[in-house]
Amino acid sequence: MTIVKYVIGFVLSLVLTMTAYWVTVNGIDKTTLYLILAVLALVQMVVQLIFFLHLGEEARPRYKLATFLLMSFMLAIIVVGSIWIMDNMNYNMANMSPNEKNDYMLMQHDKGF
Amino acid sequence: MKDAVEEKFLFNKTTIGFWLYLMTDCILFASLFATFAVLRHATAGGPSGSQIFEMPLVMAETIILLTSSFTCGLALVALKARKITQMVVALASTYILGAAFLTIEISEFAKLIGEGNGPAHSAFLSAFFTLVGTHGLHIFMGLLWLLVLVAMLMRRGITSKWVRQMTLFALFWHFLDLVWIFIFTVVYLMGVAK
Amino acid sequence: MFGRLTLDALPHDPVTIGGVAGGTVGLLIIIAAMTYFKKWGWLWREWLTSLDPKKIGVMYIVVAVIMLLRGLADVAMLRAQQAIFATSPNSPISPDLFQQVFSAHGTIMIFFVAMGVIFGLINLIVPLQIGARDVAFPLLNSISFWLFVAGMVLMNVSLGLGEFSAAGWLAYPPLSELAYSPGTGVDYWIWSLQIAGVGSLLSGVNFLITIFLMRRKGMTLMKMPIFVWSVVTSMVLVIFAFPILTATLAMLGLDRLLGMHFFTADMGGNPMMYVNLIWAWGHPEVYILVLPAFGVFSEIVPVFSRKKLFGYTSMVLALIAIMILSFTVWLHHFFTMGAGANVNAFFGIMTMVIAVPTGVKVFNWIFTMFRGRVSFQTPMLWFMAFVATFTIGGVTGVLMAVPGIDFVVHNSLFLVAHFHNMIIGGVLFGAFAAYAYWFPKFTGFRLHEGLGKVAFWCWLVGFLVAFLPLYALGFMGAVRRMDHYDASLGWQGLFIAAGVGVLIILLGVFFQVVQLAYSVWKRKELAVGPDPWGGRTLEWATSTPIAEYNFATLDAVHDRDAYWTVKKAHEKLSAQYYDIHVPNNSGYGALIGAAALGVGFALIWHIWWLAGVSMIALIALVISSTQRTDVEHVITAREVALTEKRLRGKRA
């Protein structure tokens, strides 16, 4: 854990943040932009995990790394799953007015899912 | 010899335990992120992200928090080398930068609420305020923790317990920086994208 | 001054007044007796402030048993209504009260009975089985327990002050939103679960670290007793699922408290997101409860078959598979909400897949019994009953995993019967088996076998009589949560049968109480040694009663069935004692629990000053608890030697 590591991490993080900002203000099409931003954020996550949080430096057994990987997997399931489910819900309910949706959801009281 | 083994065990126990807590916090934020993602277009006639976000300020917040994370790391390095003055300076910078971040965030919130765009205005704003506010609450807790650390330092000096606590705090602070990267990307950058 | 809290909050209808009066009188009698016998100091010193996981475990179970009795009283009311009064317009239980009672029944049984029993069991058994003297964070353990108690108290306060949620045990919006439930009921639900949930989360972290870092020397991961493995998987689910609950409850709370619009139907809110999130927690929660029960049976079957567990590795892999898969099936709780064919098909298939590792476990247990010398004592009887009922529940579960079939039977009593098959047949029977199995380890005498068998048969028969009619009623179209139906439907006979089943179950509970009282009375005759069943794992290597430090010496472990190999080889435990550090008692757990209770109560009733004061107190207590200096005391080697001699007699 030396000062060099922190400096590298800091500089890399700054560069990645500036790049993300620069790409966003210089408007490109949305899909590409989202993809680039996601990649930049994930790269910065890895940078900070290694240089700031020192993940991977622990001695075996690597409980931190193992729990982090498991957490990332579960997190991906929850986030991607939720978005996928809700997109489908919204698609199927697109022609429902808020009132109809309300009545539909209230049905769970006496006739739930 | 026995004490060294004992101390190493204590250190492992607390850091890995705290790490597990951070993992649970990740899932907490993930739930808020998922909700934000689902509700991000639900502006209900109110403003959307690109209409209310002031990107220069947000960028400043990001740099400030990142620097504060960096100085926190420097404090840890100084502690390892037992350079106490350097460490105190680094910790003070961390605190000031963290407080500056929180001040900007609160003023941003206050301005939005003053303009009538409070969290009760639309589902999008509810999700925005809650996600960013939860991060802010963590920062607030971190600042409180730092004060407690300073008080502990003044009372008892550098003890092995203090070193453990300081290490946990550094983990917490870096973690909050990490969460902010995703808030910055998902909420702000993707929010203002045309 | 007191927010929304006025005299109107006191109960009005006779049923609730009766319940509150009964509860209050009971509480007053206990308080009076405690004062008369001057037991408060003893209670505070020996139990409430204790950081000994053995004592915390017992306290968890005491709370859970009290809550079980309340949950059963609730259900007796529900079934009485459905069997006797449902076809007539006049009934003592109003529709609104009926809704509160079924909401309370579900909430209590899951959060305060099942969770309490599971955490109690983990506290009692895990440190012993891994050969440790303590948990990783003793004070945190006490705080978790007290947060659990605070949630429980808050939940029960709703009986006498205000009302409880009438929105079902998971409080779906928009019904649980301010527009439809303006009273305090849903707030009680939110805050009692929020507080208890944080406690569970902290326990999850605590026990994972305990198991990761504090195992006896030589006990590798693949040499851990299978119950410990089941706890690992269950606690992993706790730490990854409970934050979702915390976030979801917080968002519903913000909707209600600050007028936000997460789950309202207007202003862009999306009630379906709530259903999605709550089940992303709720499905893993089912496995959080049932995995330790699997672990219990995996301990009991080898001991009572005199064989080692069949397929240890496959058992561990099955646990891990269930752990991961349980995060991929949550949509099957709302197939009919409208996600469409693709999504439903995916989650339907995942649901069927999860039955495979569960099936592996059932076969492993049966193969363990195969050609073993099986003795059918009470723990084993519970296991046999579990296999039968759990398989029925599993089969009906796979049936409902087919979205097409789910569209037919969803929300019916068929579903209710299914999940009671899983929770009672799985979790509760597992808890009862564990109770009969480990009771002598902690008390020094066993439970009376004959009365145990009577109680068992009452439970099993009562369970079948109470729930099999519900499958039929579900097919006939009876929906859940129904307090009135038309007499011409011809359902009353089956409802009466289900009601009789509940009575038989209550008879079983009665015999369990009698069994406990009788066993305590005849404890001299029922006294047993430290290893009454021929146990295989380390908890049976301790003395009975167990010393505060669990193990006097920390001999290395060589084998999966650690104690069995020691006994086989006639190895002597080393008699070289060292000083042992044990944690001091601490009142912080109780105080932090009290502060959390204050925060919850104040937020329910909008008493802002109290919320502020309690919040500051809570933070101050947490900070000051980290500054303790007198954390532990030393039991000297000499004292250890004396204690061992006293507890083990001449054999040591």
Image (cartoon, grey):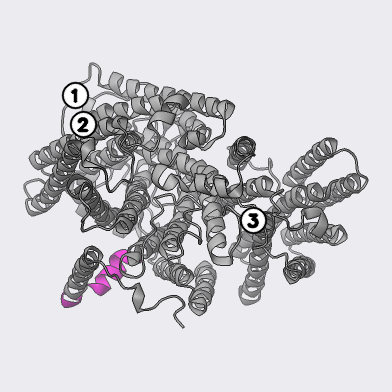
- The label number, if any, that marks residue C267 in the structure image: 3
Q: Which residue is mark 2?
A: C380
Residue C48 sits inside the magenta stretch = yes
Q: Secondary structure at mark 2?
A: helix
Please report contact status of discs 1 and 2: CB closer than 8 Å, yes or no.
Answer: yes
Question: Counting other residues with Cα less than 10 Å from the Cα at mark 3, is it few (<14), some (14-19), or many (20 or more)?
Answer: many
Quarter location, residue C184: bottom left
Q: Nearer the viewer, residue B30 or C17?
A: C17
Q: Secondary structure at mark 1?
A: loop
Q: Do discs 3 and 1 belong to a common subunit?
A: yes
Quarter location, residue C491: top left
| Comes first in the chain, label 3 or label 1 | 3
Q: Amino acid at mark 3?
A: Met
Q: Amino acid at mark 2?
A: Met
Check the residue under mark 1 and report the chain it is in: C
Magenta highlight range: C35-49
- How far apart are labels 2 and 3 at the CA level? 57 Å
